Image: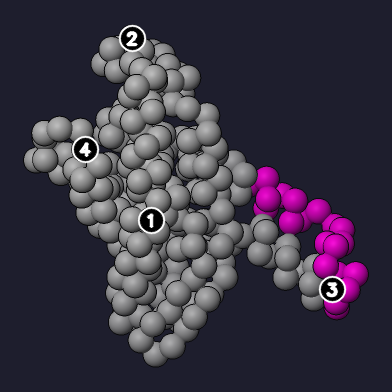
Amino acid sequence: MVQKLVKEWFRFKLLLREVPAMCMVFFVVSVILMNLLANKELFNSKWLALDCGFTISWISFLCMDMIVKRFGVKASIQLSLFAECINLIFSTILFIVSLIPGNWSASYNYNQVAINEALDITIGGTWYVVFGSTTAFIVSSIINAFVNHNIGRLLYSRDTFKNYAIRSYVSTFIGQFVDNLIFAYIVSINFFGWSHAQCWICAFTMAVFELLCEAIFSPLGYKVYRGWVNKRIGDAYLHQI
């Protein structure tokens, strides 16, 4: 058992070395920003409500689609959990910073006390937003990886953009819908006062928007993936499996 864990640890370290740094930078930063932007409500009506987390979350799924295509399901899930661990570390740091007395720059132009308190609360986050975002992302990233991989197996043929797009679009929509719905039922319905209808419509609407972003940038994602293949990036990890 110990030997197996040690072997898996060395494989994971090899994976971190093989995955291009720029991809991981965008991946991790997008996961961190999702937490912060989820604190801001963009729109709230009787049937529809949106938070700003959807404006950045599509980047995470774009990165996951490239990773699962090149490195596989296991690698995608492991890197998603790794990104979430970094997010929790930074969430903790931001929370500690929010407790430190001091003035934010915006407080010199507006009501000092009100602005400082508001920014401390926003930057420090709240436990339910962090918990909801973390839970939603972990579940959705696992679903996204498996759906993407299994559709790829069904479409097994030439490595074309069409096949890449189909597996990416379907997995992204399903993954994003699950992500939005879980977050809505953990956070929005309990702390923002959303209705059940708002939760479902919001989850669907944001998933559609995020799918559109994926569709716009998927040619770039496919180009990056093909670059990895042509440069044999990831071969060392893939040959270890």
Q: Which residue in the structure is indicated by mark 4?
A: 160
Residue at position x 85%, y 69% from top?
Answer: 107
Callout 2 amino acid: Gln
Secondary structure of residue under mark 2? helix
Q: Circle 2 sits on which residue?
A: 3
Mark 2 or mark 3, which is nearer the start of the sequence? 2
The magenta span reads: 92-111
Question: Residue 216 shows which numbered tag?
Answer: 1
On screen, 4 above or below 65? Answer: above
C-alpha separation, residue under disc 4 versus residue under disc 3? 57 Å
Image quarter of the N terminus: top left
Q: Alpha-carbon neighbours of circle 1 within 10 Å: few (<14), some, or many (≥20)?
A: few
The one nearer the camera, 210 or 94, is 210
For the residue carrying disc 4, how many other residues have a C-alpha within 10 Å: few (<14), some (14-19), or many (20+)? Answer: few
C-alpha distance separating marks 3 and 1:
43 Å
Task: Residue under label 3, please give it.
Answer: 113
> Amino acid type of disc 3?
Val
- Of badges 3 and 1, the one in the foreground is 1
Q: Is residue 91 left or right of residue 179?
A: right
Judged left or right of residue 34, residue 62 is left
The amino acid type, in three-letter code, at marker 1 is Ile
Q: Determine whether, in the image, residue 101 is placed left or right of residue 74.
A: right
Q: Amino acid at mark 4?
A: Thr
Question: Which residue is at the front of the view, 226 or 86?
Answer: 226
Point out the frontmost of discs 4 and 2. 4
Query: SS class of the residue under badge 1?
Result: helix
Is residue 94 inside the magenta stretch? yes
- Measure the C-alpha gap from mark 3 to mark 2: 56 Å
Dot placed on the residue nearer the N-terminal end, 4 or 2? 2
* Residue 227 visible at all: yes
Query: What is the spatial separation of the Cα atoms under label 1 and label 4, in whole angstroms?
Result: 17 Å
**Is residue 135 visible in the rendered structure shown here?**
no
